[in-house]
Image (cartoon, rainbow, N blue to C red):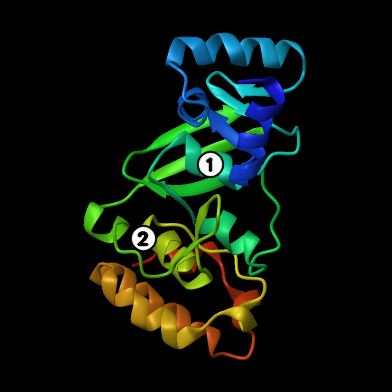
Amino acid sequence: MERDNKLKILYDTGRTVFTLKNLADLWNLSYESAKVVVKRMVDKNVLYRVATGYYTITERYNLLELANLIITPSYVSLQSALFYHNISFQVSNIITSVAKINYTKKIGDTIFKYHSMKEEIFFNLEGLIYHKTFTIAIPERAILDCLYFGYLPDIDNPGKINFTYLKELSLFYPKSVRKKVKELMRRWKKKDLIKNFTKEFCFRF
């Protein structure tokens, strides 16, 4: 298969980042043969090496896509999802995800951090959005995940939150999280809302 055809197969997937196994499967090659082909393509700047075992067809690859790829299955959540949905305005070099294991990996200037969740909650698909190349929590699930792992969610734009759905979705989480949601909603109803939040609130439960 010629190089141009190999590249076309990659572009046709709509993805920007691949593991070596992905490439071998897409090109119908053995793992060892794919290693040889990839090395040649990287040497010619046709493919770019992101990190050991990860390759991209563009230097401007999708970080959220890479986050899903490093640990599979996983979904982007917590502060990263809130920032993605324009709920939080806090810029960070950390991409936060939920998975079945705790794991941290740094690639370039970005830290990919994974939080381990109980399987019965993790595999509940309510509140997840499946884009073509990555999966991410909706704002309400991202907030619940923050509370589940003991973080105070950064909420700069509460007008985009569906409070009714937040309460409904909290039923899938432990009682301790539901308690935090009730307190959160009670405080959000006050005039000064988010501005008067302090880290003390978080975590007196």
* Residue 48 position by quadrant: top right
* Residue 177 position by quadrant: bottom left
Q: Is residue 105 above or below residue 132?
A: above
Q: Earlier in the sequence, mark 1 or mark 2?
A: 1
Q: Residues within 10 Å of mark 2 (few under 14, many from 20)?
A: some
| Horizontal and vertical percent position of residue 128 | 44, 64
Which element carries disc 2, helix, strand or loop? helix
Question: Is 25 in front, or is 81?
Answer: 25
Residue type at tag 1: Ala
| Horizontal and vertical percent position of residue 122 | 31, 56
128 on left or right of 195: left
Which element carries disc 1, helix, strand or loop? helix
| Horizontal and vertical percent position of residue 190 | 56, 90
* Residue 175 position by quadrant: bottom left
Q: Which residue is mark 1?
A: 67
Is residue 9 visible in the rendered image? The answer is: yes
Count of labels in the image: 2
Residue type at tag 2: Tyr
Q: Quadrant where the C terminus lies?
A: bottom left
Q: Residue at x 50, y 31 (%)?
A: 26
**Callout in the foreground (1, 2):** 1
Q: Is residue 44 above or below residue 6?
A: above
Q: Residue at x 43, y 83 (%)?
A: 165
Q: CA distance from mark 1 to mark 2?
A: 20 Å
Question: Is 182 in front, or is 21?
Answer: 21
Q: Which residue is mark 2?
A: 148
| Horizontal and vertical percent position of residue 9 | 61, 35
Q: Is residue 82 above or below residue 149?
A: below
93 on left or right of 204: right
Q: Is residue 9 above or below residue 35?
A: below
Which label belongs to residue 158? none
Question: Is 135 in front, or is 113?
Answer: 135
